[in-house]
Image (spheres, helix red, strand yellow):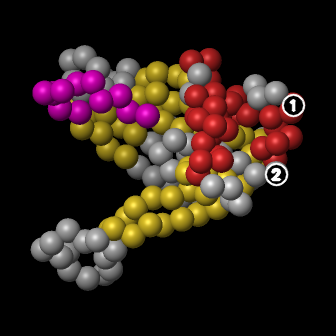
Amino acid sequence: MLYAIETPPKGGDTLFANMYLAYEELSAGMKEILERLVAIHETAVPDVDPYKETPAEPAPLINKQGEHPVICVHPETGRKLLYVNKTYTTRFKGLTEEESRPILDYLFQHATKAEFTARIHWAPGTLTFWDNRCTQHLPINDYHGFRREMYRITIES
């Protein structure tokens, strides 16, 4: 959930993309190819012990890596969805980044088509609620010089 406290006079919207629709609108041939693929998701995170004091110097970064099927089934709805994103998905298991790039670039563009997205225009008091397992979101950073304060609440099931 995301709750707007303070919003800029213009800009600062958030785009939400529906990964169910992104999957459903793929061709049968593409779905067949993707069903067999596993995506590698990576991110650099600080190499610190969260139970110790915060170091005075910035901590070195380490690469965290996970593997997820490209086509997932939502555990509660049973619906299939596309599970890749431009921020973390770097390649497919068993393929190089160079080999993976053309398909990933296509999927990143496909997943964020206008017909799969909703745009939230924030005002103080606006509340959104989404399922991170089947939705991508992107805050639009177009409000230079103004403040945008949001409270985020994560619900663990």
Whether residue 78 is visible:
no
Q: Is residue 2 magenta?
A: no
Q: What amino acid is found at the position of numbered circle 1 in the picture?
A: Ala
Q: Earlier in the sequence, mark 2 or mark 1?
A: 1
Quadrant of the image occupied by residue 110: top right
Q: Secondary structure at mark 1?
A: helix
- Residue under numbered circle 1: 28
**Residue 5, quarter of picture:** top left
Predominant SS along the magenta part = loop
**Residue beneath the point at 87% across and 31% down:** 28
**Where is 16 relative to 33, above or below?**
above
Q: Residue at x 32, y 80 (%)?
A: 49
* Residue in front for this viewpoint, 54 or 35: 35
Q: Is residue 40 above or below residue 28?
A: below
Q: Residue at x 38, y 33 (%)?
A: 139
Dot label at residue 11:
none
Q: Which mark, residue 36?
A: 2
Residue 150 x %, y %: 30, 39
Q: Which residues are magenta?
A: 138-148
Query: Tag 2: residue type?
Result: Arg
Q: Nearer the viewer, residue 19 or 112?
A: 112
Task: For label 1, count other residues whose C-alpha is less than 10 Å away and answer few (under 14), some (14-19) or many (20+).
Answer: few
At 37% from the left edge and 64% from the top edge, which residue is drawn? 45
Residue sitting at the far bottom: 52
- SS category of the residue bearing label 2: loop
**Image spot of residue 129 (x, y percent):** 50, 38
